[in-house]
Image (cartoon, rainbow, N blue to C red):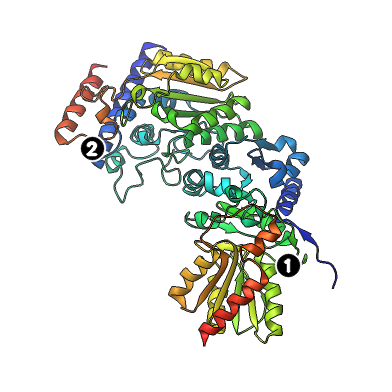
């Protein structure tokens, strides 16, 4: 097997912004003193006159973005997930969300895989926060390819979009032919014993889990949900009906994220067991990202174990 | 300003004040004090200064106003209605369940509202964003925003000020409605945000201090702000909270309280008398 290419989705974010910059000049990109880390710096380098640094003032940046969008222009704002969704939550809600403005929020360094910076910077609650804002679209791409296509789609979308990117280099799982559509989940592996619904970097882990389970005689369907809101309920309902039990996998708190979204939907539409792989109700800690994924139970083996629980519940 | 023009604006300000009282009385809630204190400024901006057309509330090239102190929505709605954006009769439906007139400005549903606002400190940043957009894309419109004095206790106000001055947003004019009172008491007793002039100067603004109820001073300050090309302007307006209604003037209690039927009649009688005297 050829060596798998690994690259962080934040790199895709920067590259996609440059690509969009080449195509159109009707938008502004902003950052809050983290351009080098969020990779909006790639856009800054390519189009310095179209980039504005707000300095370390994320709340101001969100409301400024709302003002720009209110004049009919597009705007992209970048920061770490902790500060975009967390610190500036109320600005995102009231300045951007309430008037339903065309602001793309590029939130990088999401989840536990921030690594060494530790708990203060490891945002595992951003999806939960953003999900509560009416009209907010939330996209959590699985790899480089999907991240680039998601940025392109966000520029055509009407309304605010929260985009979640990671710091850690992760395997590229999709090829260039991969079709991305906001609000659409994708079945990556067939299977009728159980369904693994994964998002972000957990999609690759889910694909690995699929292979491990197959060797043990369990056929697990694997669905990639990049758009957590609006949720593709059609593909989830079909999976619940056909496989009878679900395991969700996300690099986010088990409170309020993908697992919650799937549970909330299925508890009304088609109650089946929904078991969650994610960050338990706990803060993160410092360490190399790859080690933290082991420590916090965000690996293929953790999905495998949870799938076995789910299958047992089904019987 | 010529006397006929000034007299006309005074009449309009009186009409705006009556609309404010109609609104908060109809709502049985709302914020009359800080609405009455900015009625004169709004009369000048919407009837004399701003490049706007009520028939085209979303025109791309229009001047914009963000009411950062969004709780003064009764004043904004009243000036918009009196200017012809919608029927003045709608004002009495303020805050009613089936009315478009939300407790705080809603740009999606109210003609003439340029930005949703109400969570203090955010509107001024939105205005900065509009001014930045205009500069960046080469648009010629001006952006006005009105801050409450108490609102300046929000840290975001100063984040916005820092950015606006740093980016030399000379197309932005920030008004501070310095009426001296906030919900919990006098601003210099609660958590004094003054001095406003020195603070805005230190942040890099052109600063002008005026009597916010004097049309000559308002006109001159707004015109002088427009002459400055290398930085934004802050106009500190000394105002009277509750201006125009005797029992509300300088009374903290009328920040967020509606008059009962009896006091409504008193207020309307006073304002009608003021109008008749002009």
Mark number for residue B238?
A: none
In the structure shown, which secondary structural element does the residue marked by tag 1 occupy?
Answer: loop
The answer for which chain carries disc 2 is: B
Q: Nearer the viewer, residue B184 or B209?
A: B184
In this view, B114 is above or below A228: above
Q: Nearer the viewer, residue B115 or A235?
A: A235
Q: Outermost residue, left direction?
A: B262
Q: Nearer the viewer, mark 1 or mark 2?
A: 1
Q: Outermost residue, top direction?
A: B2
In the rendered image, the quadrant that contains the C terminus of chain B is top left
Left/right placement of residue B198 relative to residue B183 reads: right
Residue B216 x/y as whole percent: 41, 13
Which residue does the image show at 49% across and 28% down from the upper left?
B144
Q: Quadrant of residue A276?
A: bottom right
Name the residue carrying label 2: B25
Tell me, yes or no, if residue A40 can be seen here.
no
Name the residue carrying label 1: A178
Q: Are the two marked residues, 1 and 2, in contact with CB atoms closer than 8 angstroms?
A: no
Residue B275 x/y as whole percent: 25, 21
Total label count? Answer: 2
In the structure shown, which secondary structural element does the residue marked by tag 2 occupy?
Answer: helix
Tell me, yes or no, if residue B35 can be seen here.
yes
In the rendered image, the quadrant that contains the N terminus of chain B is top left
Residues packed near mark 2 inside 10 Å, few (<14), some (14 to 19) or many (20 plus): many
Left/right placement of residue B159 relative to residue A27 reads: left
Residues packed near mark 1 inside 10 Å, few (<14), some (14 to 19) or many (20 plus): few
The answer for which chain carries disc 1 is: A
């Amino acid at each position: 097997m050829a060596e798998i290419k690994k690259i962080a989705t934040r790199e895709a974010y920067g590259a996609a912004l440059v690509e969009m910059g080449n195509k159109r000049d009707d938008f502004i990109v902003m950052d809050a003193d983290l351009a080098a880390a969020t990779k909006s710096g790639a856009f800054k380098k390519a189009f310095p006159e179209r980039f504005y640094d707000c300095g370390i003032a994320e709340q101001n940046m969100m409301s400024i973005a709302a003002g720009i969008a209110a004049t009919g222009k597009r705007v992209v704002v970048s920061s770490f997930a902790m500060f975009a969704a967390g610190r500036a939550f109320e600005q995102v809600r009231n300045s951007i969300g309430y008037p339903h403005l065309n602001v793309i929020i590029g939130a990088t360094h999401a989840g536990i895989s921030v690594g060494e910076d530790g708990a203060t910077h490891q945002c595992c609650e951003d999806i939960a926060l953003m999900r509560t804002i009416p009209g907010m679209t939330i996209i959590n791409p699985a790899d480089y390819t999907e991240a680039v296509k998601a940025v392109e789609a966000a520029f055509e979308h009407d309304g605010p979009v929260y985009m979640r990117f990671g710091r850690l280099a992760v395997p590229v799982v999709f090829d260039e032919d991969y079709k991305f559509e906001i609000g659409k989940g994708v079945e990556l592996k067939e299977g009728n014993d159980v369904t693994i619904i994964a998002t972000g970097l957990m999609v690759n882990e889910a694909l690995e889990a699929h292979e491990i389970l197959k060797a043990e005689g369990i056929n697990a369907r694997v669905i990639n949900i990049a758009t957590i809101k609006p949720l593709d309920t059609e593909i989830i309902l079909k999976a619940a009906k056909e496989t009878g039990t679900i395991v969700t996998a996300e690099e986010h708190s088990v409170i309020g994220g993908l697992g919650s979204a799937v549970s909330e939907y299925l508890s009304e539409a088609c109650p089946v067991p929904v078991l969650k792989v994610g960050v338990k109700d706990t803060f993160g800690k410092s360490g190399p990202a790859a080690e933290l994924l082991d420590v916090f139970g965000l690996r293929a083996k953790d999905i495998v174990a949870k799938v076995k629980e789910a299958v047992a519940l089904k019987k | 300003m010529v006397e006929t023009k000034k007299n006309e604006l005074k009449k309009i300000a009186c009409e705006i004040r009556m609309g404010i009282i109609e609104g908060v009385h109809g709502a049985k809630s709302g914020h009359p004090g800080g609405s009455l204190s900015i009625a004169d400024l709004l009369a000048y901006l919407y009837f004399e200064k701003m490049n706007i057309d009520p028939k085209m509330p979303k025109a791309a090239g229009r001047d914009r106003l963000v009411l950062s102190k969004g709780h003064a929505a009764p004043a904004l709605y009243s000036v918009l209605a009196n200017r012809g954006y919608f029927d003045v009769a709608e004002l009495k439906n303020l805050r009613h369940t089936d009315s478009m007139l939300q407790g705080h400005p809603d740009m999606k549903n109210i003609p003439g509202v340029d930005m949703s606002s109400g969570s203090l400190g955010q509107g001024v940043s939105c205005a900065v964003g509009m001014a930045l957009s205009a500069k960046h894309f080469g648009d010629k419109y001006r952006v006005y925003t009105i801050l409450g004095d108490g609102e300046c206790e929000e840290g975001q106000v100063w984040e916005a000020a820092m950015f606006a001055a740093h980016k030399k947003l000379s197309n932005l004019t920030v008004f501070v409605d310095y009426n001296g009172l906030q919900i919990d008491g006098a601003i210099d007793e609660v958590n004094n945000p003054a001095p406003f002039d020195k603070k805005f100067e230190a942040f890099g603004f052109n600063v002008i201090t005026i009597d916010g109820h004097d049309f000559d001073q308002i006109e001159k300050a707004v015109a002088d702000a427009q002459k400055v090309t290398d930085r934004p302007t802050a106009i500190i307006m000394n105002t009277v909270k509750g201006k125009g209604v005797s029992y509300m003037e300088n009374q903290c209690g009328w920040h967020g309280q509606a008059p009962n039927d009896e006091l409504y009649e008193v207020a309307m009688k006073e304002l009608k008398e003021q109008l008749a005297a002009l």
